[in-house]
Amino acid sequence: MAWKRVVLEIGMGTDIKGRDYTKAAVRALRDALWHNSLGTAAALGLDVDSMRVEVTIGVTRPDQVDRNAVLAVLPHGTGTVNVVEGGLEILNDEGTDGTLVASAAAVVRLDLP
């Protein structure tokens, strides 16, 4: 058997004030996951916890994201989190605060023939 991609989910998350990169990343992954109810594993007779989920987060400062906090969002299966440069940051007029936009992609894989 081989691990095959069965689902790609995408989402966006923001932190309007405070520039918390982890908060924006967690919200982006929740946006990707919480708008779906996947029955793929069950339809194939597999346990939902048999899924492998590869999460990619895009933010302007990847080193500021707590990967474990993002991983904790996954309701089923096991996962990995890769944080890359992306997203968007809009500073206020003084440059002291701003709004963050994070992007998330979650690739779900199942071990299939």
Image (cartoon, rainbow, N blue to C red):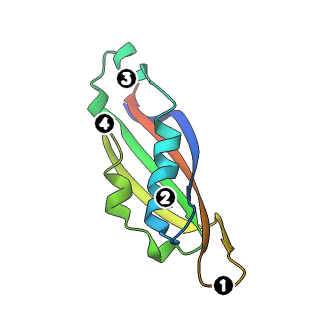
| Amino acid bearing label 1 | Gly
The residue carrying mark 4 is 76
Q: Quadrant of the C terminus?
A: top left
Q: CA distance from mark 3 to mark 1?
A: 47 Å
Q: For the residue labelled by badge 4, is the local secondary structure a helix, a strand or a loop?
A: loop
Q: Nearer the viewer, residue 41 or 12?
A: 12
| Amino acid bearing label 4 | His
| Amino acid bearing label 2 | Ala
Q: CA distance from mark 2 to mark 3?
A: 26 Å
The disc at residue 7 is: none
Q: CA distance from mark 1 to mark 4?
A: 40 Å
Q: For the residue labelled by badge 1, is the local secondary structure a helix, a strand or a loop?
A: loop
Horizontally, is 88 left or right of 76 in the view? right
Instruction: Residue at 35%, 43% (x, y): give it.
Output: 74
Picture coordinates of residue 34 (x, y %)?
46, 35
* First of labels 2, 3 by sequence position: 2
Q: CA distance from mark 2 to mark 1?
A: 22 Å
